Image (cartoon, rainbow, N blue to C red):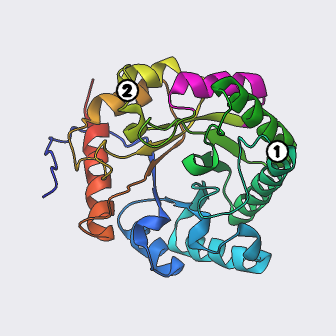
Amino acid sequence: MSVLRNKGITNSRFLMRYAICNETFEGWEHAKVCKTVAELGYTGLEIAPFTLAPRITDVTVAQRETLRREAESAGVHIIGLHWLLAKTEGLQLTSPDASIRQKTADYLVELAKACRDFGGDLMVFGSPAQRRIPAGATRAQAVDYAVDSFNRAKKGIADAGVRLCLEPLAPTEADFIQTAAEACEILDRINHPNFVLHLDVKAMSSETIPIPELIKTHAARLGHFHANDANKRGPGFGAVDFTPIFQALKSIGYAGWVSVEVFDYTPDPVTIARESIRYMRECEAQKA
């Protein structure tokens, strides 16, 4: 049974823009997803490319326009992409092979073009399987390889008007870029305004620094935010208290999206989406 805390809502204007990731609705038609999330109060939809086709280049410009129109007609904005390299083959951000790094960079640019066609302007780079430290390589070498891959892609990504949001992941999920500080070290080396930090509540829960402190420390870098519980379920379905998290986001003047991303799809997509936004709005309305 989900643990949904019931907090009294004070009089407050909601400032956060709420989105949800489309893979939550596995097997649903895109138009139905858009209509449902809009009815539940979301104004943004984040898309995992693998839900559309094996490769984003398999989705034609005409198909992209259709998906965009379906979202807009429902009152939802496609904000961008995540799980960028999931289920692809032959791509690796941290490959020692320069030709593979170039292929990876070229594909990131293709993703950016698709993101633009959908009407979005952000891409979340998580993809733990495609950013592992290569066998026999050091962490420092992996950083060099990652920076090189991103440098090869950054002009194309910027030309598309898209920001790449680099996502730290917990040690249980990735052996590389496990903290916000590590992500920022890479962003410093890339040194481009279209490369920003992504923060995810589940991932931040693995850090020794409290989540509100992480948000405040990295405020200048923060470009996107994923809301979920440490137990891989939606906000309010576990032990993480989102009230101080939203207070921290408000304190830094965060104006980006708060996007629900879950990895445990129980009990069902509609319940996840409905109760997650209900709980987040309750937390957002709390006075500091």
Q: Which residue is mark 2?
A: 211
**Badge 2, how many Cα within 10 Å: few under 14, some, many 20+?**
many
Q: Is residue 103 left or right of residue 140?
A: right
Q: Residue at x 39, y 38 (%)?
A: 201
Residue 209 coordinates in the image, percent (x, y): 38, 19
Residue 154 coordinates in the image, percent (x, y): 82, 41
Query: Which amino acid type is shown beneath numbered disc 1?
Result: Asp
Q: Quadrant of the N terminus?
A: bottom left
Kindly indicate the quadrant of the structure image that contains residue 250. Answer: top left
Up/down of 288 relative to 261, above or below: above
Q: Are marks 1 and 2 in contact (CB under 8 Å)?
A: no
Check residue 206 for magenta coloring: no
Kindly indicate the quadrant of the structure image that contains residue 98. Answer: top right
Q: Quadrant of the C terminus?
A: top left
Q: Nearer the viewer, residue 110 or 115?
A: 110
Chain-order first, disc 1 or disc 2: 1
For discs 1 and 2, the disc positioned in front in the rendered view: 1
Query: Which amino acid type is shown beneath numbered disc 2?
Result: Ile
Q: Which residue is mark 1?
A: 97
Q: Secondary structure at mark 2?
A: helix
Q: Residue 190 got which mark?
A: none
Q: Residue at x 55, y 46 (%)?
A: 128
- Look at the image and tell me whether residue 191 can be seen: no
Q: Nearer the viewer, residue 141 or 108?
A: 141
Residue 30 coordinates in the image, percent (x, y): 53, 77
CA gap between label 1 and label 2 equals 36 Å
Q: Residue at x 37, y 69 (%)?
A: 39
Give the magenta range.
177-194
Name the outermost residue toward the front: 136
